[in-house]
Image (cartoon, grey):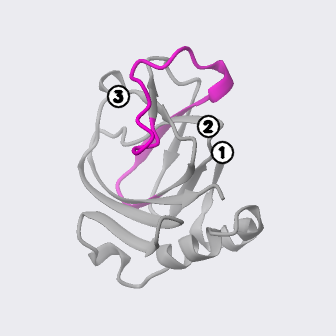
Amino acid sequence: MIIDILKNASDYVALNPHFAKAFAFLNREDLADLEVGRHDVDGQNVYAVVAKGHGRKAEEALIETHDHYIDIQFVLRGTDSIGWKARHDLGPTIQASDPRSDVDFYEDPPTHWTDITPGMLGIYFPEDGHMPMISEGELHKVIVKVAMK
């Protein structure tokens, strides 16, 4: 997991061959004006999901992991309190993984919480169990999905 601000994103480009395109997308001047839903950036290598709406309560959410994609969670408005727990410490999945959706869910509670505020990003790798969209207010964010290979 990496927590930082978008301004420092270039420090992480060497970690994945697709990060440069992901961070360029997040630096778009019209990012806040994009419609809710999926936006293709670089085929299956990089795509983004714009989300707007009221946050969830932690007790109504589940930790998730991904095998094939890295999540870059970028907040435009609101505060996303993202829970985290190391994948190797998570119990069994509660829903069978659908390879097309690249997500597994767990009932475990997070061991750590991080508030991601506007301009910040959280980068969650396959080894990072994370519980996003936790907020008492409205959220406007972009989740960029970056292929591992």
Numbered badge on residue 128:
2
The image quadrant where one finds the C terminus is: bottom right
In this view of the protein, which residue sits in the foreground, 48 or 6? 48
Please report contact status of discs 2 and 1: CB closer than 8 Å, yes or no.
yes
Find the distance from the CA under tag 2 to the CA under tag 1. 6 Å
Residue at image position (37%, 38%) is 134
Quarter of the image for residue 142 reads bottom left
x, y percentage for residue 41? 45, 74
x, y percentage for residue 39? 35, 70
Q: Earlier in the sequence, mark 1 or mark 3?
A: 1
Q: Is residue 52 above or below residue 83?
A: below
In this view of the protein, which residue sits in the foreground, 51 or 18? 18
Q: Earlier in the sequence, mark 2 or mark 1?
A: 1
Question: Which residue has dot 1 on it?
Answer: 1
Quarter of the image for residue 99 reads top left
Question: Which residue has dot 3 on it?
Answer: 61
Q: Residue furthest top?
A: 91
Q: Is residue 105 above or below residue 94?
A: below
Residue at image position (62%, 73%) is 7
> Quick one: label 3, few (<14), some, or many (20+) residues within 10 Å?
some
- Tell me the amino acid under the disc marked 3: Ala
